[in-house]
Amino acid sequence: MTNPAFKTSIATVSISGTLDAKLRAIADAGYDGAEIFENDLLSTHLSAREIAAMMQDLGLACTMFQPFRDLDGLPEPQRARAFDRLERKFDVMQELGTDLLLVCSSCSPLADCDRERTIADLTEAAERAAARGLRLGYEALAWGRHVHDHREAWGIVRDADHPALGLVLDSFHSLSRKIPSSSIGDIRADKLFIVQVADAPMLDMDHLGWSRHFRSMPGQGDFPLDDWAGAIRKIGYQGYWSLEIFNDRFRAGSASGVALDGYRALRLMEGGITRPSPSAAALPPRVKTSGVEFIEFAASHEEAENLAAMLRPLGFRPTARHRSKDVTRWTQGVEDPVNIVINCEPEGLAHSFDVVHGASVCALGLAVDDVPGALARADFLRVPRFQQALAPDEWPIPSVRGVGGSLIYFVDAATRAAMWAHEFPHALENPAPGPRLRIDHVAQTMQYEEFLSWLLFYVALFDVEKTPQLDIADPMGLIQSQAVENADRSVRFTLNGSLAAQSLTSRFIQNYFGAGVQHIAFATDDIMAVADAAHAQGLPRLEIPRNYFDDLEARWGLEPDLIDAMAARDILYDRDGEAEYLQFYSRAFARRVFFEVVERRGYAGYGAINAPIRLAAQARHKPDFPD
């Protein structure tokens, strides 16, 4: 379900590879068109005519040729050479089959600041373009020498008043300078020739460096794109929305993956990133979740026994067996229990997952109110579904591909009790007494280059918000971390990636052979009781140095008895105002996955201040985390 009035495009500079490979990736991702970046054309073995033919075969419009730099305000003889160069670019455009050229505001130190001179130069250029059936789009670069504000660029275009001269709006150039989006209301829609889109994190640095290295897809950064896009829609713009992204991570990624991310990001922006847009009603809505219904481990029988030895101290018991498969349901609690499924089947996805990764989380089940709607949203974003052969008596649970090739199942919240009763009819042990747990969050670790892609996956598919990005100090390097959460925080994922080859995050990926779930956090209302029970039953725990607890006493003025109680149980502590957070960790199971237990006393974060302490403690356990 796509909106034909919302036309998508991407500049070829946004993705890696040769120009022909880029164009195939763009077409495969579903775009309507592509901007040809000049350097891509100069470096290809194909002629402009051959590229035009290829784009036609792929069903792609050539939305623009770009960029043309330093045209306006130049003295002679530089001005004459610039116009000669312009005529040559017109030749290329006609061979490419595009009628639009991006003209950037001048950065030349020779450029004159005289506004009338700029208008005269652009008018002459537009007259030459019109004589050949072409158009010019003028863009105010954020680092332009004299013109660096779209309001000023629009004033020049308006006053030139030439039919072949229009405006190019680029979100980066406007929002990096914090130009009010309300000013877009002054622009005439017929003079807005194309819209270029990029998000970015808020950084305090020069605009050129910021633009060249840190642009991101809509939804991955911090720009108020909903306001900006809403202002453009309000003036009646009907042209292309085209991504122009410069980012070192994307250049290191696959062309197909980045192109698909960009398509998803544009569709996310179409419906609204942080709030619904007028287009949202016509699109499949973001998937609303009401909790993590289950976590599924793939394991051999031997691995399953070792995993069981870590689950039992946390109060889990094997309460039921699958009707026909070698799959066991482990639960903690009686009413609305936490569900962990251990899959020891000798074939199928779980078996393949275990062969590749070892015992690990191969799937997550999320409770959703509208399963058909969830699938429609996934299809809309080109998120691949997963289908595995079902026995005639099996309960169908649709799923899509998630991080590291794992699955995300959409569990119908209204029928989940019936699903469990049907799929796991063979009773085993009774639930264990003791403090009840809940799934607090699931931590996923991935390659640094994949981080933004999976962040976009979650914010585009699910009705979640992202928390601010954090840099966490590992003894061997920095780890980038960011969380996504649904409204009631019943579903929370923390995403982690690192460039440091010896960080715990990177070593997990190397040992695990890919991205995946690195730890699972359970919430409780009585962490002391859970810790006592877990440790008494042999849960291998992560040992925290006494120095940490001595500092806690000094920093927070906590009672010595409380400090001693936490130290005896290796419980870490944080506070935000009056809100408190207590947490302890197990050692790692199979050198891959570890468990966390938290108690939240009004605290909304994840104890990031304690992460370096935890990472240093884990680094000391060589058997858990290999070099």
Image (cartoon, rainbow, N blue to C red):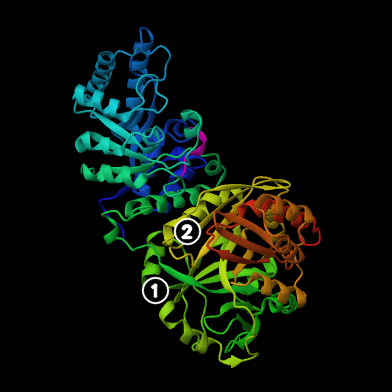
Q: Residues within 10 Å of mark 1 (few under 14, many from 20)?
A: some
Residue 5: x percent and y percent?
A: 25, 51
230 to the left or right of 343: left
Above or below 467: residue 128: above
Queried whether the magenta region covers residue 214, the answer comes back as: yes
Q: Quadrant of residue 93?
A: top left
Q: Nearer the viewer, residue 490 or 68?
A: 490
Q: Label 1 sits on what residue type? A: Asp
> Label 2 vs label 1: CA separation?
17 Å
Q: Amino acid at mark 2?
A: Tyr
Residue 395 seen in render: no
SS at circle 1: loop
State the quadrant of the N terminus. Answer: bottom left
In this picture, which residue range is highlighted in magenta? 212-216
Give percent across and percent down for residue 594: 69, 65
Q: Are marks 2 and 1 in contact (CB under 8 Å)?
A: no
Residue 107 in picture, x, y percent from top left: 41, 20
- Check disc 2 and report its element: helix, strand or loop: helix
Q: Which mark is residue 458?
A: 2
Residue at the extreme top of the image, as rendered = 76
**Magenta-colored segment: predominant secondary structure:** helix
Taking the spot 51% from the left edge, 52% from the top edge, the residue there is: 453
Label 2 CA crowd tier, 10 Å (few <14, some 14–19, many 20+): many
Q: Is residue 151 magenta?
A: no
**Number of numbered discs visible in the structure rendering:** 2
Nearer-N-terminus badge (2/1): 1
Q: Quadrant of residue 610?
A: bottom right
Picture coordinates of residue 167, whole percent (x, y): 28, 31
Which one is in front, 173 or 351? 173
> In this figure, which residue is indicated by the disc labeled 1?
369
Q: Is residue 220 visible?
A: yes
User: Which is more toward the observer, 576 or 305?
Assistant: 576
